[in-house]
Amino acid sequence: MKTFQWCLILITTAVIVTGCAAAENTTANDNSDKQDMIVQGNNTFALELYARLQNSDGNLFLSPYSISTALAMTYAGARSRTAEQMADMLHFPVGQSPAHLNSRQLASEFGKRIKDLNARGENGAYELTVANALWGQKDYGFLAEFLELVETHYDGRLNEVDFIGATETARQTINAWVEKKTKEKIKNLIPKGMLDSMTRLVLTNAIYFKGNWAQQFEEDRTREAPFTLSDGKKIDVPMMNQTTKFNYMETDTLQGLELPYVDDELSMIVLLPKEHDGLGELEQSLTLEKLSEWQSKLRKREVIVSIPKFKLTSQFSLASILKAMGMTDAFSGSANFSGMNGKRNLAISAVIHKAYVDVNEEGTEAAAATAVTMRLTSMGPGSQPPVFRADHPFLFLIRDNQSGSILFIGRLMNPKA
């Protein structure tokens, strides 16, 4: 029997910045509540971002966790209305009330989650790494407080490069880091022309996961079978098959299946519409409350499972989408990132995200990358086992079962695209 490995795509988020005109002691319960608030906020942002991206054609895959983390590092340097807009859009639980966090506490809680994921990935039966880095113009004069906060809580150390005199070298250096952290799955994240002599800072995040299925697929049971596209056209694709006990649920319109990885610490959840053209309706109804409702209905039972082998890559430039979601000042002359350098002369010029996933009998490999660039600017169980046959478009996500965090989310429209 072949080992089924799931290697989650490394997502690197790069925030590119350009220029323009005390943590409190808490109890264990308080810490748990704060983590819950962070996770719920991140998951809400994940589904809202997916809702913005779902109108694009074809396959889709991303790591909202990577994007949230890269923007959280950027948020550490935001002030006034820029910070308020970012916190609202990202659903960060920050504010003045005792029930909310301040900026440093937010970074601390994010950091605890990153350290936990990395520790489990290092010691567990799967690979999981979250990496952050800052790439700043040499001798630029970033505030020590900003650099200390990002390094302490996000493990994002400053690497000095020369955007002014050696732009292409700086781009290649950042892309090489992304490629290394994603085990060569994400290449050329930042394309030529994205950086220039006005760039002052690039913030990157990368997440990588690889694990074995708890219930493995046998390669010799994979068969070519029809996959029905949303328009009714059929194509032949390799379908993997097994019959065993999984957490399963169904409603009048969809089926849900949880495929756990070894140790049951992470899982892939597949949401399959009952109609071949039903994914659009499913996506329209996808909210955090609805997802929680479907997950609460999952029950262990024997299921006859068929899912396709597939690989897909997605790449996004997210600036216009994030602005439409309410984060407007950060990209304009009104931006206030004075927490980075003591001045109001930096703005985000780009947020780039790229993700990759490969699902097969040997395993699944996934990687994604996001870059934020900143630059200077002038301004009921039944009697028979149910059949879960994913032979038409479906939605899938990878979650950390311990925290409930959505690490990756995507849809498969065409396994051969």
Image: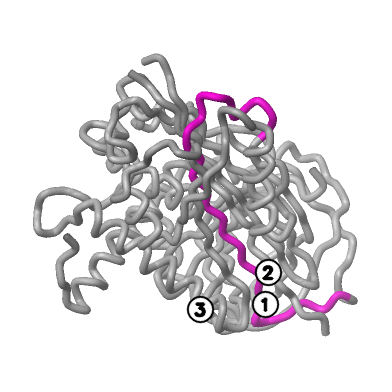
**Residue 13 vs residue 416, the one in the foreground:** 13
Asked if residue 36 is positioned above or below residue 236 in the image, the reply reads: below
**Residue 327 vs residue 199, the one in the foreground:** 199
Residue type of the residue flagged with mark 1: Trp
Asked if residue 371 is positioned above or below residue 364 in the image, the reply reads: above
Image point 29% across, 30% down: which residue?
Answer: 343
Question: Is residue 106 within the magenta segment?
Answer: no
Provide the secondary structure element on which disc 2 rests.
strand
Residue 415 place in picture, x, y as percent: 78, 50
Q: CA distance from mark 1 to mark 3?
A: 17 Å
The label on residue 213 is 1
Q: CA distance from mark 2 to mark 3?
A: 16 Å
Residue type of the residue flagged with mark 2: Trp
The label on residue 6 is 2
Is there any visible trace of residue 222 in the rendered image? yes
Q: Which one is in front in this view, the residue at disc 2 or the one at disc 3?
A: 3
**Residue 175 vs residue 6, the one in the foreground:** 175
Asked if residue 193 is positioned above or below residue 25 in the image, the reply reads: above
Give the magenta part as a residue range.
Answer: 191-219
**Residue 335 horizontal side relative to residue 243, left or right:** left
Neighbours of disc 3 within 10 Å: few (<14), some (14-19), many (20+)? some
- Residue position for label 3: 120
Residue type of the residue flagged with mark 3: Arg
Q: Dividing the picture into quarters, in which one does residue 280 lie?
A: top right
Q: Earlier in the sequence, mark 2 or mark 1?
A: 2
Residue 89 place in picture, x, y as percent: 33, 39
The label on residue 43 is none
Provide the secondary structure element on which disc 3 rests.
helix
Neighbours of disc 2 within 10 Å: few (<14), some (14-19), many (20+)? many
